[in-house]
C-alpha cells in the first residue's frame, strides 16, 4: 500500500486555482522533506516545489509567485496551492517524500491537473 495519497486534481480554466493535498500514512512525517513533481504528456518529470522539515521552500521558476507549498505536520499532510493556472501547468502531479538516510522515500500515485485555455 502506497503511504502517500494525493487529492485535489481536476479540470480548471486558465486563471483559476486548485489546491492539491497529499497525506502520508507512515511515521516520522515531520522530519521528511516533501515535494511536488509534475509530468506533462511527452515530458520528463520535473520538480515543482519542495518544503524542508523546517519549512524552507523552493520552487521551479515557472511557478514562482503562483504556487505555494505548505505542510501540516499535525495532520501528516502537504499542500500545493496553485493560483493563476496556465494551460502549460497541465500535468500529472506527484507527491514525493524524499529518500533520506534509512528513510526509503515514497511517491504517490499522481493526480491529474488539466488547465483549459
Image (cartoon, grey):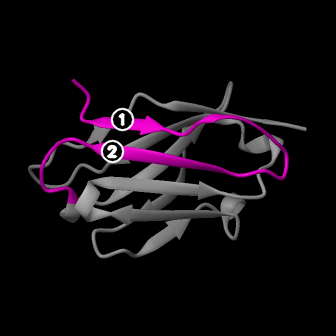
| Image quarter (top left, top right, bottom left or bottom right) of the C terminus | top right
Q: Quickly name the residue at label 1.
A: 5
Contact (Cβ within 8 Å) of mark 2 with mark 1:
yes
Q: In the structure shown, which secondary structural element does the residue marked by tag 1 occupy?
A: strand
Q: Nearer the viewer, residue 47 or 5?
A: 5
Q: In the structure shown, which secondary structural element does the residue marked by tag 2 occupy?
A: strand
| Image quarter (top left, top right, bottom left or bottom right) of the N terminus | top left
Residue 86 against residue 7 in the figure, above or below? below
Residue at x 59% of width, y 36% of height: 9
Q: Quadrant of residue 26?
A: top left
Residue 10 in the magenta stretch? The answer is yes
Residue situated furthest right in the rendering:
117
Quick check: 63 left or right of 99? right
Quick check: 104 left or right of 89? left
Residue 99 against residue 115 in the figure, above or below? below
Residue at x 72% of width, y 44% of height: 89
Q: Could you tell me how far apart the alpha carbons at marks 2 and 1 are, in whole angstroms? A: 5 Å
The range drawn in magenta is 1-29
Residue 12 in the magenta stretch? The answer is yes
Q: Which mark is residue 23?
A: 2
Q: Earlier in the sequence, mark 2 or mark 1?
A: 1
Where's residue 37, x and y in %? 51, 45
Q: Quadrant of residue 81?
A: bottom right
Crowd around label 1: few <14 · some 14–19 · many ≥20 (10 Å): some
Residue at x 54% of width, y 40% of height: 8
Quick check: 47 left or right of 90? left
Crowd around label 2: few <14 · some 14–19 · many ≥20 (10 Å): many
Residue situated furthest left in the rendering:
102
Quick check: 22 left or right of 32? right
Where's residue 12, x and y in %? 76, 39
Where's residue 11, x and y in %? 72, 33
Residue 77 against residue 105 in the figure, above or below? below
Amino acid at each position: 500500500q502506497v503511504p502517500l495519497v494525493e487529492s485535489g486534481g481536476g479540470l480548471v480554466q486558465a486563471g483559476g486555482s486548485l489546491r492539491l493535498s497529499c497525506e502520508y500514512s507512515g511515521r516520522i512525517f515531520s522530519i521528511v522533506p516533501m515535494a511536488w513533481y509534475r509530468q506533462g504528456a511527452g515530458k520528463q518529470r520535473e520538480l515543482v516545489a519542495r518544503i524542508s522539515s523546517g519549512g524552507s521552500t523552493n520552487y521551479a521558476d515557472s511557478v514562482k509567485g503562483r504556487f505555494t507549498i505548505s505542510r501540516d505536520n499535525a495532520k501528516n499532510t502537504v499542500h500545493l496551492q496553485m493560483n493563476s493556472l496556465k494551460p502549460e501547468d497541465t500535468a500529472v502531479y506527484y507527491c514525493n517524500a524524499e529518500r533520506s538516510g534509512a528513510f526509503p522515500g515514497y511517491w504517490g500515485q499522481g493526480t491529474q491537473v488539466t488547465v483549459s485555455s
